[in-house]
Image: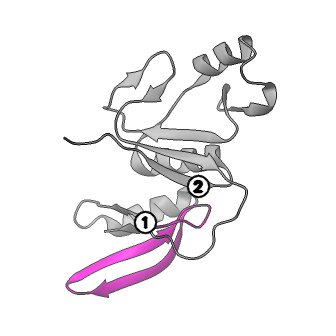
Amino acid sequence: MALHWKLVVDCADPNRLAAFWGAALGYEVEDNSALIERLLGAGAVGPEDVVETGGRKAWRNLAAVRHPEDPVDAASGTGLGRRLLFQAVPEPKRGKNRLHLDLHVAAGTRDDEVKRLEGLGAAVLRVVTGHGNSHVTMTDPEGNEFDVQ
């Protein structure tokens, strides 16, 4: 039996990383504003739990992106398929990631994709060549490593 999953990324600014990764992957930033409004109205959460981003209410400490073709829970705006969840943590990133994403691009387009990602806020860390393979290791706006192949 296959399990459902989401990848959770600890970070300082969830909404900033969700915007970056949504644009980088062509994913949609989840819109939880209807759920947030309901919870604010019920007194279950307070204004300190919420920020405004992109003209709508969003969680201060959580943001997610989802694959645009996957289903969504209409009541909460939560994706029900492939998604990345970014959660705020108090401590800064230390050291190299133990898990990273590999972005696979069409043959001959890697350099253009690297430039596009740099325009979104990524940085090139190094170019790796060996074992019959070549990729560019980059960092997202908070320094999390990923590879472009």
Residue named by callout 1? 99
Location of residue 45 in the rendering, given as x and y in whole percent from the top left corner:
73, 24
Q: Quadrant of the C terminus?
A: bottom left
In this view, the residue in front, 55 or 71, is 71
Q: Is residue 8 left or right of residue 71?
A: right
Q: Which mark is residue 10?
A: 2
* Residue 104, horizontal then vertical, whole percent: 29, 61
Q: Earlier in the sequence, mark 1 or mark 2?
A: 2
Alpha-carbon neighbours of circle 1 within 10 Å: few (<14), some, or many (≥20)?
Answer: few
Position of residue 89 in the picture relative to residue 21 (left or right): right
Q: Is residue 42 magenta?
A: no
Q: Give the overall secondary structure of the magenta segment.
A: strand
Snapshot quadrant of residue 148: bottom left
Q: Nearer the viewer, residue 95 or 67?
A: 95
Query: Regarding mark 2 in the picture, which secondary structure is present there?
Result: strand
Q: Position of residue 62 (x, y in %)?
A: 61, 40
Three-letter code, disc 1? Leu
Q: Secondary structure at mark 1?
A: loop
Magenta span covers which residues? Answer: 122-145
Which amino acid does the dot numbered 2 rest on? Asp
